[in-house]
Image: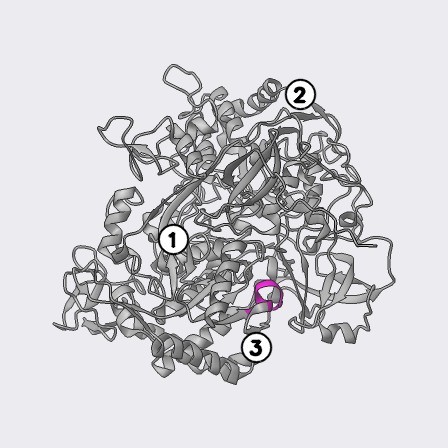
Amino acid sequence: MTFQQPKIDTSPKVSDEVRQTTCYMCACRCGINVHMKEGKVAYIEGNKDHPVNKGVLCAKGSAGIMQHLSPARLRAPMKRVGERGSGKFEEISWDEAYDIAVKWLKPIRETAPEKLAFFTGRDQSQSFTSWWAQAFGTPNYAAHGGFCSVNMAAGGIYTMGGAFWEFGQPDWERTKLFMLFGVAEDHDSNPIKMGLGKLKKRGAKVIGVNPIRSGYNAIADEWIGITPGTDGLFILSLIHCLMKAGKVDLSYLAQFTNAPVLVNEDPKSPEFGLLLTTEDGKHMVIDRATGKPAAFDAPGVQPDLAGARRVAGITHRSVFQHMADKYLVEDYSPEKIGPKIGLTANRIHRIAAELARVAFDEAIEIDQPWTDFRGTKHEKMIGRPVSFHAMRGISAHSNGFQTCRALHHLQIILGSVETPGGMRFKPPYPKPATAHPKPHCKVTPGQPLDGPHLGFTHGPDDLCLREDGSPARIDKAFTWENPMSSHGMMHMVISNAHAGDPYKIDTLFMYMANMAWNSSMNTSGVMKMLTDKDETGNYVIPHIIYSDAYSSEMVAYSDLILPDTTYLERHDCISLLDRPICEADAAADAIRWPVVEPDRNVKGFQSALCDLGARLNLPGFVTETGEQKFKDYADYIVNHERRPGVGPLAGWRVGDGAAESTLQHGRGAPNASQLDEYIKNGGFWAEHIPQEAQFYKPWNTAYQDWAVKIGLYDKPTPYLFTLYSEPLRRFQLAAMGHGTRQPPEHLRERIKTTLDPLPIWYAPLEDGYVDPVEFPIHALTQRPMAMYHSWGSQNAWLRQIHGHNPLYIPTKLWEAHKFAEGDWARVTSTHGEITVPVAHMAALNENTIWTWNAIGKRKGAWALEDDAPEATKGFLLNHLIHELLPPKGDGMRWTNSDPVTGQAAWFDLRVKIEKVRTPTRSYPDVPAQSSPVGRGPANVTQKIGNS
């Protein structure tokens, strides 16, 4: 009998229509094609024309359809009817929800606006949410950056005007040696994977520096399983080797950095350690051509790295000579550093030699003339094809700011920033810290705040302190404890509000920030703080308003819920004012738009803010006659102007004095059809940088002029990279007794030690509070590629990849504790303990354990069953971490944060581990919440149409 082959339709009808928008399943902001069939979402694929992903789409992006269909979606506004944390709610109308919010918010705006604390998670619309908070008048606003990556962002901006990831990227097309430090695998994953593919195809070497060899590090040609928290020592040892061997780009340092600028070395001067300036206030260098002092940007000046000036018996030397004094000492030699970081001295020497060989022996020359800001014409663009990339791995330590600065120093001394083959900035970067606003905190009842909340301090005068010296912000950002906390300190909001320190608040308003679970340190403690009542029986934090698209753990702890849409049902603006999708060769922005309309009584959060702003009569949200100015967020995107000619979107604007049919890009008046133009173009706009402007951006006159033309700057803003940071030195001087604004006595030594103007290393702060003999093991979390924060946890497809998370144990510890497959362990920190399943992993630093973050869930959340594996075998390491360091007998509880920026030090955790009898479920076993959305079905299926 002849075998009958099955008949398979190899070209099924996938869709009736394709609608193009922007993915929201992680922070990459990839372009997607949403296939529609009979008006419903049938299939999602990558948009091959999109500048970010060029058609590539990961598992998360493809699974966006299941995010859109999630049974955990909220369905209507709700008010709490049970105790906080119970999850018991009653559905209400939007009008009633707004009435409740106005009832709470209007009185405090008129009397004490600081009693509103408004904090958002990774919402990708921070320029809008911060503008709303500024109009309200509260100083208490920030987004998630303070507990995620502010060390990297601030370290980069203070040093070179930008950092990695959303600020810049490796020159994937030309790099020959690439070093990757600690990048979470869900962040920027498509561009990094595409870039790594290019490097592998060309045979470029990839070095991964991470205690854990997973994901990107698994395909590295060389893996360095460094001891957590010692990256800064490794980097400074590489700098030592390069400087000792003379393998630094002297021409680059002299022309484009403050290495030749003179430092005031008079110990009796109140400006001791600051940079000298000319009479017109410009940084002073010695001109090699004349041997005389000159302004750094004077036409034709040739700054001398060895320059010095003797005045009144005092010799003032260049920054470069101070760098030599600091980094050429034997304390940074590989022989001294190697044992501290788990590497041999020979290996450090070899890596330094590889960096030098590739940077200088394999240099790139591009025959492209360009003119610098001094008017000097260069015939070629010289490239150092060594590039670096890093993120949370080195950032989330209490020494992370200085470590990030050290890494930027390393690439700068090689001449590999903004040169071919190196690290390249993405518009609107680069721009110096001085081009950003300073933080503002002046509160006037019934009036807006006096300026933007977040920014960059340049000395004690910029701190957010009240007249009595106490913190002006509830999170204590921009105070002597964390003076350069550019993104705020979201991880401290709830504990400070609960303690009434520095003052009590009335309303905590949060968006997409799961602070009752995986986004908080001290998770069990935070849940208690949210439910604590005072002696009168009222909640210590009186009111909590929360917005989310899904029934997360935080929903149950809120009093009023404003339900958000899914990303396929909303307008969004990925703006040059905020977190754009630019690439190194082009400026770009993008939108999301409702490819489908919600089938529930939900509203995009930003549109809800437009409504609420109008009801509160906030400036900017009402017309002169008191009517609502923006009917929704889409209306705001099109018609709002941050300054004349510059709005949220740069594409398809109306030209000055031109007919409305004449459109231009960059600057221009609002265009009523702007969103339609974006939709026709695939949901994005991009404009390429002219060829002569693509490198040397901070100093290239062609780039500076182009940036002004499209509205990135209002005037050319060339600047020098700041190897020596004056803002840090100004805080040191205050701690030394200079100036009218000085820190409290108990903080002086810490400020003098940690705020060094040249990068340093100090041990993670927890090491000084925890006995390393009792707690000898480092414990880390990473984010898996297939999840992003909490969002993928209820996704039917992604749950099949990560249904629960074991604790991974290195071979040395596995054998020492006689673990076997299926075993469980008790893990204890100075703060708490967890009991969890374990798994063996050989490719792991021998004194480090780790797990995936945000897999473990609380029973009752996310529409999951109580016996879901995420709730029974999944867990959080967060239960072991506290927002405060342990007591040390000095009467103080210090924040578990970087002392410069306030970044949460998630990765400083030390623990001990022991084998235990296998339990029935992971510990702590938090009681179930009621689910306001019920439970999801056991199986999820969908068939759209008949073909």
Residue nearest the observer in this picture, 580 or 925: 580
Foreground: disc 2 or disc 1: 1
Quick check: is 211 in the magenta stretch?
yes
Region of the chain picked out in magenta, as a range: 209-218
- Distance, label 2 to label 3, CA atoms, is 59 Å
Foreground: disc 3 or disc 1: 1
User: Badge 2 local density, few (<14 within 10 Å), some, or many (20+)?
Assistant: some
Residue nearest the observer in this picture, 846 or 942: 942
Residue 28, position in %: x, y?
51, 49
Instruction: Say what amino acid the circle numbered 2 marks.
Output: Ile
First of labels 2, 3 by sequence position: 2
Q: Does 54 sit left or right of 851 as displayed?
A: left
The residue to which callout 2 is attached is: 92
Q: Residue at x 23, y 49 (%)?
A: 705
Q: Is residue 271 visible?
A: yes
First of labels 2, 1 by sequence position: 2
Residue 809, position in %: x, y?
72, 68
- Distance, label 2 to label 1, CA atoms, is 45 Å
First of labels 3, 1 by sequence position: 3
Q: Does 16 sit left or right of 136 as displayed?
A: right
SS for callout 1: loop
Foreground: disc 2 or disc 3: 2
Give the total number of marks visible in the rendering: 3
| Residue 203: image tag | none
User: Badge 1 local density, few (<14 within 10 Å), some, or many (20+)?
Assistant: many
| Residue 340: image tag | 3
Instruction: Say what amino acid the circle numbered 3 marks.
Output: Lys
